[in-house]
Image (cartoon, grey):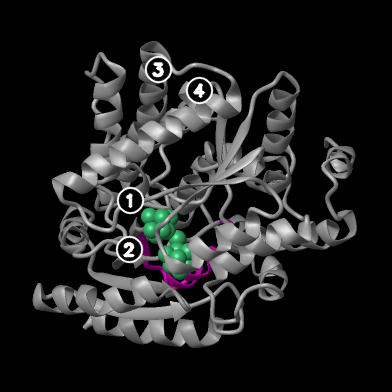
Amino acid sequence: MVDYRKMWQDLNMDIEAHDQLCKVLPQAFGDVYLSQKNQPEGMAYYTTAVLNIHGIRPAELVEAQKSGTKIFGTFCVYVPDEIIFAAGGIATGLCGGSQFWVSSGEKVLPTNTCSLIKASIGARLDRTCPFFSIADIFVGETTCDGKKKAWEILNKYTPVYVMNLPQQKRAKDVANWAQEIREFLAKAEEVTGNKVTTESLNRAIKLVNDKRRALQRLYSFRKLSNPPISGKDCLLISQIAFYDDPARFTEMTNKLCDELDQRVQNGVGVYAPNAKRILFTGTPMAIPNWKLHHIVESESVAVVGEETCTGIRYFDNLVDENQTTLEGMINALAERYMKINCACFTPNSARIEDIKRYVREYGADGVIDANLKFCTLYDIEGYTVERALKEAGVAVLGLETDYSDGDFAQLRTRVEAFLEILNV
Ligand code: BJ8
């Protein structure tokens, strides 16, 4: 086993506090994941990745930095990774998913801020996350109010570049987003000292599209009547997609899919025949936030999809690969990214249509609309989501939670009651 302590010390991390965090993860992971029966062998790659999440990938990033590569930390699926890779940088996700960081975030943020923002700020302030310590620059975006204000705090520790995301989707908004991407490209060139060329952007578009295609392939197995992989495993893979080297992630995910193809041919599934099927919608679930999937799948129910940014929203659309000019590629990027349907947009009716389509495609018996406490955007949009689903005859349960385990028993009771309705 590699010892990463020297790297953490060099990164000026708080080693004592970090030791506490490291103690929690294997226990949590073991409870949720290692108890699963009949896991595909290909999951070993993701298990190693998550159990060494503060070691393997950070060490690669530090190594890359030694040869001058710049690391860009991002927090939202609207930030186009393609631009970063095309400029010779590396993009890595930074969202905090652990309750461990929340109290530190609360030292500088109001308590009634969502756990994701509190944990992200806490991870930086605490100096207990190597990704936050390694990043040369953070790339923020104007999505929700909490994040907009959080950038101002984070900027005191690491430079933050903020992309101004439109809040509507008219033609002029897509054009404005293309302009934001153009300006971000210039910033990425300035940070890395490299020029983005048609060749490098073309390669980067293909690199990120390949990752999306691998995830689309993985999720297609969840549409089958007898899925060969659990919802918990798929959630973990989606979460790791934000951190991992994209080419390696694509290769390993396609390899896993080859194994799943074989399982399908052999009639191997992970659920009992006729298990009920749940689709999640709502706010993202960052590592190690596996609570709701664990509750649902512990009831012998299949989680068949997530209409979240740690799920289908992350990979649902591809960037057009047929553009031959930088301008054409930037416009293609703007169009693809503006197809993501986050609750920060108004109106956001395309998201409702997406959810109804996923219910059909993934064969869901019911939907759980899960909201991270104090996320006003998704909380308010929950009204529209639930009403639309009820009108379409789809059973729906709205849940609110945070990163703590304090509500575990109460959530389980509510999920059990919901499942009883589905069983009638
Ligand atoms: S595209 S969902 S990743 S903004 S949960 S911090 S919205 S208060 S994470 Fe998100 Fe981009 Fe949208 Fe996706 Fe704010 Fe809500 Fe917290 Fe959130």
Label 1 to label 3: alpha-carbon separation? 22 Å
Q: Residues within 10 Å of mark 4 (few under 14, many from 20)?
A: many
Q: Is residue 237 left or right of residue 172?
A: right
**Any mark on residue 203, and which?**
3
For the residue marked with disc 3, what is the amino acid? Arg
| Residue drawn at 27 percent across, 63 percent down | 274
- Of labels 2 and 1, earlier in sequence is 1
User: Is residue 296 found inside the magenta-colored segment of the image?
Assistant: yes
Asked if the beta carbon under badge 3 is closer than 8 A to the nearest atom of ligand 1, the reply is: no
* Left or right of residue 108, residue 255 in this image: left
- The residue labelled by disc 2 is 344
Tell which tag, 2 or 3, sits nearer the viewer. Answer: 2
Q: Nearer the viewer, residue 310 or 136?
A: 136
- Mark 4 and 3 residues: CB-CB less than 8 Å, in contact? no
Disc 2 CB within 8 Å of nearest ligand 1 atom: yes
Q: Earlier in the sequence, mark 2 or mark 4?
A: 4
Which numbered mark, 4 or 3, is in the foreground of this view? 4
Q: Quadrant of ligand 1?
A: bottom left
Q: CA distance from mark 4 to mark 3?
A: 11 Å
Dot 1: what SS? helix
Q: Secondary structure at mark 3?
A: helix
Type of amino acid under label 1: Arg
Element at label 2: loop
